[in-house]
Image (tube, rainbow, N blue to C red):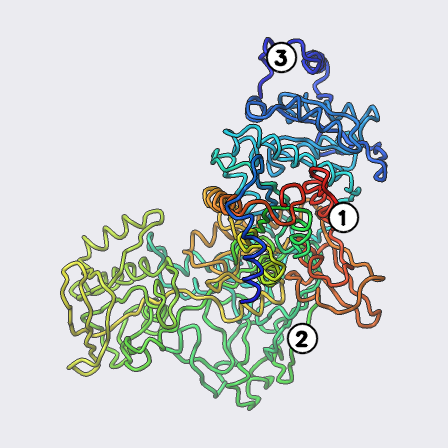
Amino acid sequence: MAHATTELSNEMNAAGNAPEGWTPKILALVCNWCTYAGLDQAGTSRMQRPANIRVLRVMCSGRLEPTMVLEAFRRGADGVIVSGCHLGDCHYTSGNYKMERRMALLKVLLKQLGIHSNRFIQTYISASEGAEATEIFSHFINGIRALGPSPLNKEWSK
Amino acid sequence: MDHGSRNRTIGEPEFELLIMAKKKNKEVEQEVPAPEVAPATEPAKKSIQSDTDNPKIGFYICDCGINIAGVLDNDALKDFAATLPNVTVSRRYKFMCSTVGQQFIQDDIKNGLVDHVVVAACSPRMHEPTFRRALDGVGLNKFLFEQANIREHCSWVNMNTPTEAMEVAKDHIRMLIAKVARNKELEVSRVKVDKNCLIIGGGVAGMNTALDLANGGYGVTLVEKEATIGGHMAQLDKTFPTMDCSACILTPRMADVGRHPNIKLMTNAEVESVEGYVGNFDVTIRQKATFVDNDKCTGCGACADHCPAWAGNEFDLGMQYRKAIYIPFPQAVPTKYVIDGKKCVKCGVCARPDVCEPLAINLNDTDKFVKKRFGTIVISTGYKPFDPTPLLQYGYGKYENVITGLQMERLLSSFGPCLGKPLRPSDLKAPHSIVFVQCVGSRSDREVSHPYCSRVCCMYALKQARQYKEKHPDANITIFYMDIRAFGKGYEEFYEICARQYGINFVRGRLAEITKGTEPGSLFVRGEDTLMQQVIEMETDMVVLSVGLEPQADVKEICAKLSVQQAGDGFFLEAHPKLRPVDTLTDGIFIAGVAAGPKDIPDAVSQAKGAASSAAVLMSQGEVEIEPYYSIVDPAKCSRCKSCLEQCPFGAIIFNDVLNLTSINPAKCKGCGTCAAACPCGAITQNHFTNDQIYGEIEVVLPMTQGGKVE
């Protein structure tokens, strides 16, 4: 459990110690057909969530590379969300399976890099799941609030 | 759209523009019927040159009434955007999607102020096509447009925190301005669509698709693997709920298909391989050896009279005999004899000139291959009835008098083995009591059964029970059911009549087991009446298992050949279960009938007509647009590892061994970009979603220089 210790030591100082004026900056990398549409549905239904999510749209979550997540963290993102269609529902039949495999490996890597596992989620949100999206995103944001700024966030971390 | 609230926006320069534009439009409307905005479908001939290295970005922010401006400070956002790199024009308007709003963009483009456009408004899923048309209308490449979503993803979900919402909106604007600066002009390519359609499977669905398309003037090739068209419907005696004679309504249509000048009927044939893409499918069809020359065979039947070899007739599910040279049933289309190679004893009697006068028999016949190009393909391969043998509790295959619903259908048929007077198989006596068992192979996760409802079994069991009661009013008929699903037009009424007028007994519960009865040939059934909460045990003369419908055995094989997908239930997968039920995810390939999932005849026919219409739409256009989001391989960077080949679910990536080159066929590529993400060399680029564009967005949203602490 060596990596868990690193993770803890890196994040311990920040946890529960959010500086005044800081608000998490979270990048959501999502597919066009399901998750983006699900977030649209959340909007149309006026489901409120904390204003921390920046949405980057690609056609399919299969387009997402682990390096995009790493780049976001390197540049100081406090959290990253990767989301596609539910398994079996991919508009391109199987892009989400490929994304899932890549992200499973990335999760291990992030731990080893000392980035808290609560800073990254890989999820599936369909075009009709605005409520689920709101719940997942809000929960994720609250988790990051508890952690404080990312250790790579140059502006806020000490 | 609100054009009437003049008082509210007086004094704003945009308002003046609005008034002018409105006046102008009004005048135009009165004098010339055509509006000044170029029609969306016809791009202007003169194209506007855009300098993609030094983009001039026009930024337009939409108030959307109060939907956006009620939460966000749009003037501040307008000023903010003006400070971003390459932005030359920054404007705000109440409704950008209105004709007037689009006019701002078009005027700026025409005046040379702008050659890239970002609109901050609603979701691009809503109005991206609108604004792209506006660009297209003045001759600017429509892919030099991006839409920043500050409504669904910002003002509507962050209503209570306007200060934070402003930051989100700024970031969304930053991202899309950074992206559009990296957008390249892309061309929508067009491919010709061949006006021939291939239909795989000649059941009632395939026949209806074929007739509709052929009547519409398109060429149709109907490939059927059996010796006749007609499918399972030809085996049915009567159809619920109208009690129409199935053959009487089907055989005239079969004859129509057989003699239609636009339909080429290929029976005993299967699709061997499919190459190409929408509009241009190059298909190889295997014409299996039938040992009879269809051009010469007159269907007289003298060969069958002389043939010494016997076999079970598949059409009657083995309950009748046929010869080794045969037609499946008298009304078969085409009425051409075929030789069953496995049963033929090669005596050569049928080939004798005194037997077959036209000399149609060729005992040295071999499989032939026919190549043809098709614009569209319709899959209507139907189903196979569930085989209940593995469900040992029902004793199918063990007890002769346990039969399936389709066997009962043949027994009831006036041209079936009993000539319409059903007899039980063991002693050829008319049964006095019959038990029907519903949901055999359906609505169960256990063993080999399927979780779905097969949708026809309730109704066919009711119909068969009623038919038997009509012939034997004193017979005792019990239906063991889970739920009676009589959902179609006239079905509930039919159920009511069966239950009340014909005195059929209904027991709610799944049958537990069928064992040998006390009388010879009789059966002992045990089950539970879940409504009475008691065990039911009874002796009966015959049991009919209402078997469900299951996918054909070759669905997977066809999926692989055609690059279409199989759903979890084993049938073909539709592009969208609600809105695109006859499309597959492969352009130009459609599905009809039970191939897409269990359904009754009216539904199968409706779907067949839907598939015909969808195919006709493509073929009548003559051309199809291909979205330019496809990926491109840079051969200089490609290491030939071929890892992209297995990433692509559409078979769009081809590795040419001779040229040692990987290439992507734009017509087959759907533009998901999975290969681009997987390429270890970075040799694959997805148009419109390049690494440069995506990392460019990440770069501006997370600038790293926040607070000036960059090292």
In the picture of the structure, the residue carrying the numbered disc 1 is B692
Task: Find the distance from the CA under tag 1 to the CA under tag 2.
Answer: 52 Å
Residue under pointer 2: B368
Instruction: Report whether B632 appears left or right of B258.
Output: right
Q: Amino acid at mark 2?
A: Lys
Sort mark 1 into few (<14), some (14-19) or many (20+) by Cα contacts within 10 Å. Answer: some
Q: Chain of mark 3?
A: B
Give the quadrant of residue B531: bottom left
Picture residue at 57% right of the left edge, 38% below the top: A23
Q: Where is residue B339 shown, x and y percent of the image?
A: 54, 80
Which element carries disc 3, helix, strand or loop?
helix
Above or below: residue B535 compared with residue A44: below
Amino acid type, label 3: Thr
Judging by the rendered image, the residue that carries numbered circle 3 is B9
The answer to whether residue A94 shows anywhere in this view is no
Q: Is residue B647 visible?
A: yes
